[in-house]
Each structure stands twice: as structure tokens, then as C-alpha cells.
Amino acid sequence: MVTYGLTAIGLCLMLGLCTRLAALGGVAFMTFVILTQFPWPTVYPPAPAPVGHALLVNKDWIEMVALWLMVAMPVGRWGGLDFFLNHWIGRPIREYFEQRV
């Protein structure tokens, strides 16, 4: 299930389909990664050099912050499949409900 979930999150982020929802799923996954692999200084074996040696701000933390920014910003409004879905489906639905009110 983890493999399928990560594949779905990655494909959605690359295609721009349900971008904010996929980024939120990525945030949840990165939160679990950080909580289960917390880089305590006394943990053996020590983390390899590319991971970094800071107690809190490592590559996993940076990835999670980047995904939080994707959740907070309107990233699907500028490109990707979310852009087309918004214009083909979202706009007619909004116009329909605006006419009824």
C-alpha cells in the first residue's frame, strides 16, 4: 500500500492532478518519516553525509516544508491538469450556480 500510495502521490504531483491533495498526502508521509527516523545524535548507525547532521532541519524536513507550501499556495491554478479541470469543469459549475442564485 505504501508503494502504491507514494506512486499515486508522485504521479499526481508530476501531472498537476489534484495537486494540493497530493501534496497533503506527501506531507502526511513525510511527517511519519520524520517521526519514525528522527535523527537523534546518539543513534547508531549515524546518518550518512548526504542526509545531513542537523537535529531537526535535514532533507526530510525541507521536503515537508516544500510540500506544505504547495498545500498553502494555489499551485493548481497556473498549470498542470488542475488548470484544465478548473476551466473545463469548475468554471461551468460555478457559472451554473451563479445563474440560479
Image: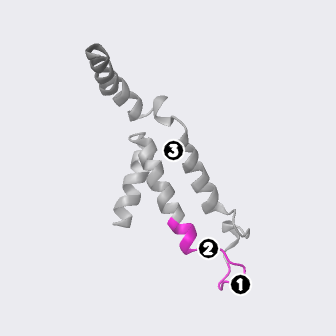
**Colouring method of the image:** one colour
Q: Dot 1: what SS? A: loop
Q: Dot 3: what SS? A: helix
The magenta stretch spans residue 49: no
| Residue at 34% over, 30% down | 85
Rendering coords of residue 56 (x, y %):
69, 66
Disc assigned to residue 71 = 3
Could you tell me the amino acid type at mark 2?
Phe
Which residue is at the far top? 99
Could you tell me the amino acid type at mark 1?
Thr
Which stretch did the figure color magenta? 32-46
| Residue at 44% over, 54% down | 25
Residue under label 2, please give it: 38
Rendering coords of residue 91 (x, y %):
34, 22
The magenta stretch spans residue 45: yes
Question: Measured along the vertical axis of the image, is residue 41 above or below residue 50?
Answer: below
Rendering coords of residue 101 (x, y %):
29, 16
Within-10-Å neighbours for mark 3: few <14, some 14–19, many 20+: many
Disc assigned to residue 42 = 1
